[in-house]
Image: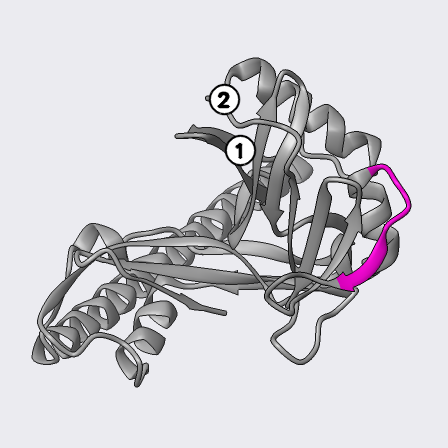
Amino acid sequence: MYWYKVKNMLIILFTLLNVFLLSMIIISNIRADKREKELSETLLTVLEKNEISVDKEVLNGERTKLHVFKIENVVEDSFEFADKITGASTKKELDEAGNICYTAGNKKVYINSGRFMMADSAVPETTQTEEDIAAAKEFFEEIGVDLSGCDSEIKGDRIVFTYKINSVPVFEKQLYVKMYGGVMSECGGHLIKILNEEENENKELYVREALLKFLRDPEREKTPFEVKGVNTGYWVILGNDSVSFKYTDAIPAYEVKTDKGSFYYYN
């Protein structure tokens, strides 16, 4: 009988303890939500004073956690890449305008600041099809670049591939292709490989942080405008006019879009 009473008392005690802990969690969440709302309202007020309007739904965007990934810039090894993309042994020379290029027959390859362009003057141009998209993917797979994770879109006389990492876009890094009957007539842009993710590198992104950086950006538009959206993605620096990198990082970043069609990027 005594043990029965003790057991009931313990059950009641644990029940009350669980109720107490649950109540504390609920109260903590309510306070956190209130704090989040206050911070958002304050930010909206500051933005409006600077003639920047933002829909509240933009601020309600979820926090995002993204890993840092290693990236290989395929075009960095100039001769090796030129030989691969042309399928022949190329030679380095100057074109008619005095620009450095790599040539093999009717094919010319230009490489600069982590970007490239290859054109075959012997292959005519035509409109692109879904079959051309498949042929382009097969072509690049044969030279060691997998485009299966990319988004592809036909834009006029070209196919545009947008790089993605686990369905998250890599901002401002695209590859364009022109095919003719399964043969490459022209291609260019960026050519990158997504390698392994960095260990213990997990970045948490906040919409408010992106808008604060945007507010403080000395290069942003100064006239009244509206922020139409804030998107998460990756930013990759492959080089500039004086240097390019063989390996670099894809860093979690935000894209801020305005009603004037401008885009701003922050990591």
Closer to the camera in the image, 189 or 221: 189
Question: Secondary structure under badge 1?
Answer: strand
Q: Quick check: 210 above or below 60?
A: below
Q: Quick check: 152 above or below 19?
A: above
Q: Which residue is mark 1?
A: 151
Q: Amino acid at mark 1?
A: Asp
- The picture places residue 4, in percent across and down from the top left corner, at 63, 34
Q: Is residue 149 visible?
A: no
Instruction: Determine which quarter of the picture holds residue 200.
Output: bottom right
Colouring method of the image = one colour
Which residue: 38% across, 71% down? Answer: 209
Give the magenta part as a residue range.
87-93
Taking the image as shown, residue 238 lies to the left or right of residue 28, namely: right
Which residue: 26% across, 78% down? Answer: 215
Residue 54 drawn in magenta: no
Q: Which mark is residue 128?
A: 2
Closer to the camera in the image, 3 or 104: 104
Q: Which mark is residue 51?
A: none
Q: Which badge, 1 or 2, is on the more N-terminal residue?
A: 2
Which residue: 71% across, 51% down? Answer: 109
Q: Are marks 1 and 2 in contact (CB under 8 Å)?
A: no
- The picture places residue 163, in percent across and down from the top left corner, at 58, 43
